[in-house]
Amino acid sequence: MTNKKKQTDPRIIRTRQLLKDAFVELLQEMDLEKLSVNRLTETATINRVTFYLHYKDISDMLDKMADDMILDISSVLGEPEAKLKPNDEENMKMLEKFLEHVALNGKFYKTVLATRRIPIFKERLLTFLTDWLVTRIESRGDDSFVQKAGIQQEIFIWYDAAAIVGTIEAWLRNDMPYSPSFLARQFYLIHTRGFEKR
């Protein structure tokens, strides 16, 4: 299967990156509602015509940026493999990879999730994590600790996805005081409390 990003013209990728960087930069000094296409294109050093070749308006840009964010996260994690029964160590490594991706793109994630809290990005991330967790839990079937503990799967998914996103928001808001590796390990310890095998 060919990667979608590899099919995209490098000039398109560059232009979208310039706009994304300008978007993040401008949101350091103004509210989203005050952001205009003029100001965005000036900061990105491109013209308005170029902007409209890529996006209908700022709302469309946000929608496509959120799509790109999920594509990036998906490529970092890979597809959840329903037939495999991953162990906790593998799950922790996946979470660490995800957190490393967030850290590498910290300015973007801090802006859209923690300081400006633009709803579309949080909603897409929650949806993605919810789907991811459903696949991972269902891959374990009756071996899932959710099943063994008698936890209603839907409630567990709501809780877990919200806990991951909420913790990442706080981590970003506090300028990432812990490494991705340490934070992933802490998630693992919290997640397995009471379920350790003795």
Image (cartoon, rainbow, N blue to C red):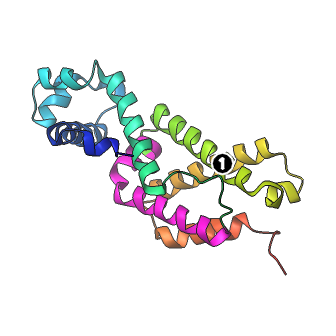
Furthest residue toward bottom = 198
Residue 148 quadrant: bottom right
Q: Position of residue 175 (x, y in %)?
A: 42, 60
Count of numbered tags: 1
Q: Amino acid at mark 1?
A: Thr
| Picture layout, residue 41 above or below residue 89 | above
Q: Nearer the viewer, residue 60 or 175?
A: 60
Magenta segment boundaries in residue numbering: 87-114
- Say whether residue 58 is left or right of residue 38: right
Most frequent secondary structure within the magenta stretch: helix
Q: Is residue 93 magenta?
A: yes
Q: Position of residue 165 (x, y in %)?
A: 57, 49
If the image is split into quadrants, where does the C terminus sit?
bottom right
Q: Nearer the viewer, residue 106 or 195?
A: 195
Residue at 59% x, 72% y: name it: 185
- Secondary structure under tag 1 reads helix
Q: Is residue 103 magenta?
A: yes
Q: Position of residue 89 (x, y in %)?
A: 62, 72
Residue at 46% x, 67% y: name it: 177
Q: Position of residue 183 (x, y in %)?
A: 55, 67
Residue named by callout 1: 135
Residue at 42% x, 52% y: name it: 75
Tell me the crowding category of disc 1: few under 14, some 14 to 19, or many 20 or more residues within 10 angstroms, Cα based: some
Furthest residue toward front = 1
Residue at 33% x, 51% y: name it: 107
| Picture layout, residue 129 above or below residue 67 | below
Residue 112 quadrant: top left
